[in-house]
Image (tube, rainbow, N blue to C red):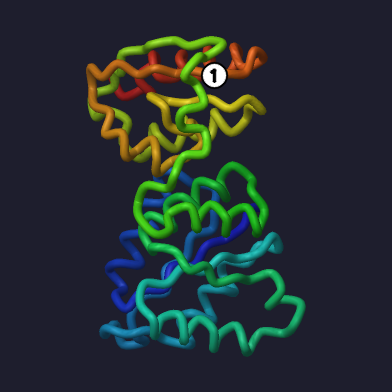
Amino acid sequence: MTVGLVFVSHSAKIADGLVDLARQMAPDVSLVAAGGMDDGGIGTSFDLVTAAIARAQSGDGVVILCDLGSAILTAETALDFLDDDERSRVGIVDAPLVEGGVVAAVAAQTGADLDGVAAAARTAVPTAVAPSPAAGATESPAYSRVVTLVNRDGLHARPAADFVTLAGTFPSEVTVNGQDATSLLAIMALGLVRGSDVEIATADPEGRNAVDALAALLASGFGEG
């Protein structure tokens, strides 16, 4: 089981589209759209949000992200109608719907708990690029490698999610061109395209295996040719 996500938007198309986007990176996570009114019009629906929470709940909890203020009010009202036990396993996160939703989905896919998924979503606040705690940590790296990106479409969302997922399996801090290798938004903000030289580095003497594994993944082209 994983933490589920509910995307509440005034537009059904936005919520459905975000589910499609996030599913590319989090195929095993319960992603549920709650967009628009009951009749498909613009707005948010208490009944749709309530049903979405129930569908997303696997037992590990549900994180809700919303687009506009009244969507938050609708989600809060839906939470008010849950019993105390279920409400304790559902949280509304104040984060950008798209960026926060994608990062939260990747965190859930990697097995993060409810607090971890919510914290990941908040890394998208207030802009798409969160400060990287590891930035600058590799001025004198203990070990580094430079790999030329070969996949056709560069380091877009799906391979970036694969990269971040792998980076998160190692205890050592690793950077990608100076950015935290575990930060999806920071890596995507680098805008790495085919042919880019990518420096993977660590200041941790024990981080060699992590750098080698991430370099191998980049060199593989993520199966995209």
- The amino acid beneath tag 1 is Thr
- In which quadrant of the rendered view does residue 223 lie? top left
For label 1, the residue is 202
Secondary element at image label 1? strand
- In which quadrant of the rendered view does residue 154 lie? top left
Q: Residue at x 57, y 60 (%)?
A: 4
- Is the residue marked by circle 1 packed among few (<14), some (14-19), or many (20+) residues within 10 Å? many
In the rendered view, does 201 fall on the left or right side of 151? right
Q: Residue at x 31, y 87 (%)?
A: 39
Q: Nearer the viewer, residue 92 or 6?
A: 92
Q: Position of residue 180 (x, y in %)?
A: 48, 33
Q: Residue at x 32, y 39 (%)?
A: 189
Residue 177, compared with residue 110, is above or below; it is above
Q: Position of residue 188 (x, y in %)?
A: 34, 38
Q: Position of residue 69 (x, y in %)?
A: 39, 81
Q: If the image is split into quadrants, where does the C terminus sit?
A: top left
Q: Count up the numbered dots.
A: 1
Residue 95, compared with residue 146, is above or below; it is below
In the rendered view, does 63 fall on the left or right side of 187? right
- In which quadrant of the rendered view does residue 117 lie? bottom right
Q: Nearer the viewer, residue 31 or 123?
A: 123
Q: Position of residue 24 (x, y in %)?
A: 40, 45
Q: Residue at x 48, y 68 (%)?
A: 94
Q: Nearer the viewer, residue 35 or 72?
A: 72
In the rendered view, does 161 fall on the left or right side of 37? right
